[in-house]
Amino acid sequence: MRLMSERDLDKIAETLEKHFDKLRKMKNVLNLGIGTKFTNGRDTGKPSIIVFVAKKQPLMQLNPEDVIPQFLGEVYVDVVELSTTDYELGHTNPSRLSPSIQRKIASGVKKNGK
C-alpha cells in the first residue's frame, strides 16, 4: 500500500472543505475525516473522505438528501459506522491503539475497554 501524497491530501482537504457543511448536516453523520477507503474490511489504499455515522442504513430507508455519495468530485467517500457499543466519549491516544481501532476514531471517540 502506498502512502498518500501531499497532492492527494491537498485534493481531499479541498474537497472536504467544499462539502463539509452539507455532509455534517446529514442525518446520522457524527464526524468527517481523511483516510483510505476500506472495502469488505480491507484497506484499498485509495485516498478518501471518511464519513463517520451512528448507524449504516439501507438506501431505501434514507431520504435523498441524507444519502452519502460514493464520490465527491474525483474523491472517494468511505462510510464508517460508529455505533454506541463501539465507542465511548473521552480522551483517546490513537498511537496506542491497534489500526482497526484507530479506524473507528472520530473526535475523541474510542472503542470501549481498549
Image (cartoon, rainbow, N blue to C red):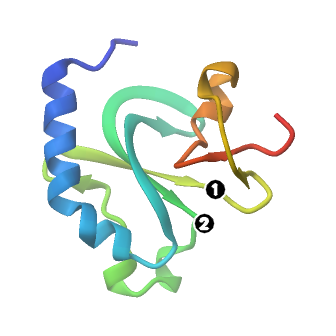
Q: Residues within 10 Å of mark 2 (few under 14, many from 20)?
A: some
The reply, left or right, for residue 20 in relation to residue 26 is: left
Sequence-wise, the earlier of marks 2 and 1 is 2
Q: Position of residue 22 (x, y in %)?
A: 26, 72
- Vertical order, 20 against 100 (above or below): below
Residue shown at the point (57%, 39%) measured from the top left = 40
Looking at numbered disc 1 in the image, what kind of residue is underneath it?
A: Leu
Please identify the quadrant where the N terminus is shown: top left
Q: Nearer the viewer, residue 59 or 55?
A: 55
Residue shown at the point (50%, 39%) measured from the top left = 39
Q: Position of residue 19 (x, y in %)?
A: 20, 62
The reply, left or right, for residue 35 in relation to residue 113 is: left
Q: Position of residue 69 (x, y in %)?
A: 30, 63
Residue reaching furthest to the top: 2
Q: Quadrant of residue 11?
A: top left
The reply, left or right, for residue 12 in relation to residue 48 is: left
Residue shown at the point (39%, 34%) measured from the top left = 35
Looking at numbered disc 2 in the image, what kind of residue is underneath it?
A: Ala
* Residue for badge 1: 82
* Residue for badge 2: 54
- Vertical order, 46 against 60 (above or below): above
